Amino acid sequence: MTEQNQKQLGNTLWAIADQLRGAMDADDFRDYMLSFLFLRYLSDNYETAAKKELGSDYPQVEKKDDSSARPVPLALWYANNPADVTAFEKQMRRKVHYVVQPQHLWSSIANMARTQSDELLNTLQAGFKYIETESFESTFQGLFSEIDLGSSKLGKGYPERNAKLCVIIKKIADGLAEFSDKLDTLGDAYEYLIGQFAAGSGKKAGEFYTPQQISDILSTIVTLDSQEPKTGVKQRLDSVMDFACGSGSLLLNVRKRMGPHGIGKIYGQEKNITTYNLARMNMLLHGVKDTEFEIFHGDTLTNDWDILRELNPAKKPAFDAIVANPPFSYRWEPTEAMGDDVRFKNHGLAPKSAADFAFLLHGFHFLKEEGVMAIILPHGVLFRGGAEERIRTKLLRDGHIDTVIGLPSNLFYSTGIPVCILVLKKCKKPDDVLFINAAEHFVKGKRQNQLTDAHIAKIIRTYQFREEEARYSRRVGMAEIEKNEFNLNISRYISTAVGEAEIDLEATHGELVEIEKAIAAAKQRHNDFLKELGLSLLP
C-alpha cells in the first residue's frame, strides 16, 4: 500500500470518527473506534492463519451484495467439522497465540451491523470477553476492560446502543473495504488515528501521545551507536524501554528504525489503564508478537513492577536504549523510605513540586553501561535550584549528561512551553556537553508549531557528529559549566543575539548625496508645473 493510500485510509477513518461521535467526548469515542479497528486486525490475522492451516479444506465463498449477510468461511468450517474444532483451536493457540470464535470475527460482526441485527451488542461483548479470558493472559487480559458497550454515552437503552453500534461498525467496515486488506496498513491507520485524537484532546493528549517529529528525534538518537554515534545505527538492541509509554508509539518508532528483528524485546510501563490497553493493542497491530514485548500497568515512581525490583545487582534488568516523555513537572509524594531507594539514594530525591528528575533517575538506573537514554523534560530541569540543582550537579560531575537539545515552544498538544531533550550515558567518551539550540528552527502552525524533516535532520546530524555552529550548537567543557554553577540554561552557552551589521560610511554618504540630488530635481520639476498653473511654488 502506498503512503498516499495509507494517508487516505487514515483520513477516511478520521472522517468517520468525526461524523459519528456526535456529542460523545472524543476520548471516549477514540476507545470504541480503536478497539473495533483492533478486532478487525485480530480477525484478519486469525483468518489468514486459519486459511493456511486448513489449506484446501478452508471453504471458498462468494461475496454477496452489501444489503445481505456475507458467508464467513470459518463459520461454515466449524458447522461442518464439529469434531475437529478442539484440535484446530489448540493448533491455532500454538501458532498465533489466540483464538477468535467465528461469530466474533470482524466479518461476522460487520455482517450483523450491515443487517442491523438486534444481537450485535451482546455478540460484541461476548467476543471481547472471550478474547480477554481465553487467550494468553499476559497479552490479552483486561484488554477491553475500559470499553463499556453498555454505556449511556452510546444510547439510553439496549436498542439505541445496539442501533448506534450497527451504524458505527457498518461505516468503519465500508471505509476499510475501500482499501487494501494488507494487515500492516491497519497499524499505520491506528497510529494516524491516535495522533488525530491527540490533536483534538488538548491537554489530555500528553498522557498518551508524543508528537511524531519529537518521537523521530528520540528514536534516532537511541538507535545510533552509543559510544561512536558517527559510525551509524547499531546492528541490534537487546532491549528497549519506555517507562511512561502512553500508547507505545515511541517504542514502535524505535522498532521501525531497527527493523522487525533488530530488537530482542520491547518493555513499556503505563499508569493509565485505558492508555495501557491502547499500547498493547498498538504493539500487536504493528506485528509485534506477544513474546516480543511486555507492557506493565503500574506506577513508575513507586516502582511496582516486580521485574524492576530485583535486589541482586547481578540479576537487575538493564536496557540498551531508554526513551521517555514523562508528564512534565508532575507533583508527587516521595516518602522518607524513598530516600534509600536504589534509584535515588546516590543523587537525592526530586522535590514534591516536580518529579522530572525522579523519572530521569528511574530510567537512568536501569540503563546499561553502554546504553543511551533520551528523555523529554521541561526547561526547568536545566536551571532550577535546590534538590534539582544537587541532582543535576552530580550527574554532570559523574560525566553522565551527554547532550542538551532545546526545542521550540508549542510543539505538544498538551502544553505550549518549550521543552528540552536530555541525552544521558553511563559511559561517554567526550568530556564535554553538547548544547543544541533548535528553539528558533521551526515552521509556525495554526495550533502547533512544526519541525520539518530538514530541522529534524539538522538536530540529528549535529548530535551524531558533535558539530559546532555559531548560534546553534556548541561543545562546552566541564570547567565552564562548573564556573556557571552547573546551570545548563542553553542561553548561557550559546548566544542567539544577531550582531549589528557594519555600516560602510563612505558608501552611505554617496547614497545620501544621490538621494538629495533626486529630491532637488523632483522639487524643481514640481515647481515648473505649479508655475504654469499660476500657483504658489514650493520654497
Image (tube, helix red, strand yellow):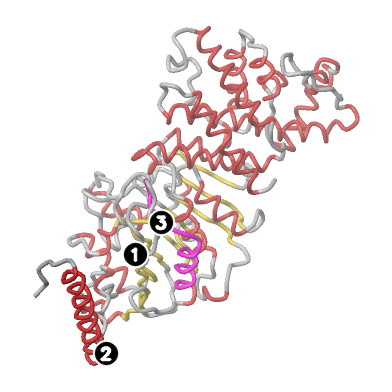
Mark 2 surroundings: few (<14), some (14-19) or many (≥20) residues within 10 A:
few
Give whichever of discs 2 and 3 has the lower sequence position: 3
In this view, the mark in front (2 or 3): 2
| 169 relative to 414 in the view: left or right | right
Whether 456 is among the magenta residues is yes
Q: Is residue 337 above or below residue 436?
A: above
- Between the residue at mark 2 and the residue at mark 3, the CA separation in whole angstroms equals 61 Å
- State which quadrant residue 10 falls in: top right
Instruction: Give the amino acid type for the residue marked by disc 2 in the picture.
Output: Ala
Query: Which span of residues is magenta-colored?
Result: 447-463
Give x and y (percent) for residue 208. 43, 42
Give x and y (percent) for residue 13. 57, 33
- State which quadrant residue 345 falls in: bottom left
- Per the image, the residue denoted by label 1 is 440
Name the one closer to the observer, 468 or 513: 513
Give the position of the C terminus as an image quadrant. Answer: bottom left
For the point 34% across and 52% down, the residue is 410
Most distant residue in the bottom direction: 506
Instruction: Give the amino acid type for the residue marked by disc 3 in the picture.
Output: Gly
Q: Mark 1 and 3 residues: CB-CB less than 8 Å, in contact?
A: no
Instruction: Give the amino acid type for the residue marked by disc 1 in the picture.
Output: Glu
In this view, the mark in front (1 or 2): 2
Give x and y (percent) for residue 116. 63, 11
